[in-house]
Image (spheres, grey):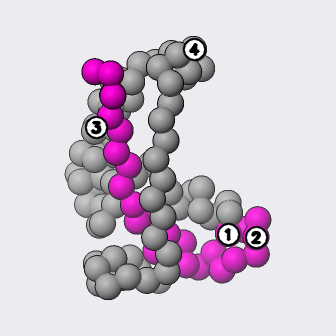
Amino acid sequence: KKATAVNGILGRGKNVVTELLVPRAVVERVLHTTAAKIVQLNIRKNLLGTLLAGGIRSANAHYANMLLGFYLATGQDAANIVEGSQGVVMAEDRDG
């Protein structure tokens, strides 16, 4: 099983888009950080880090790990995990 550009271009499996808005108070009180620092971490780790590591069609925080847990818990074929690892994480500071 290999992640390929053609699967992303022509489509294969499911496509999921998720948006999450975390209130500033929660970011500071629960995560002990700021929105600006999360944005910088995302750029450095997910975007630049994946690029430097040679990632293909991906810039994310290990989607495959979360998806594998779901596959195993629901009896799905874990061999298809590679295709589920493709994705992009975006972060923005809406007040910044």
Tell me if residue 93 is in the magenta stretch: yes
Disc 2 from disc 3: Cα separation: 34 Å
Q: How many marks?
A: 4
Q: Amino acid at mark 4?
A: Arg
Residue topped by disc 1 = 71
Q: Residue at x 50, y 30 (%)?
A: 22
Disc 4 from disc 1: Cα separation: 32 Å
**Spot occupied by residue 70 in the image (x, y as percentages of width and height):** 68, 63
Q: Amino acid at mark 2?
A: Thr
SS category of the residue bearing label 3: helix
State whether residue 32 appears in this view. Answer: no
Disc 1 from disc 3: Cα separation: 29 Å
Residue range (magenta)? 71-96
Relative to 38, say whether 54 is above or below: below
Say whether disc 1 or disc 3 marks the residue closer to the N-terminus. Answer: 3
SS category of the residue bearing label 1: helix
Q: Residue at x 36, y 55 (%)?
A: 88
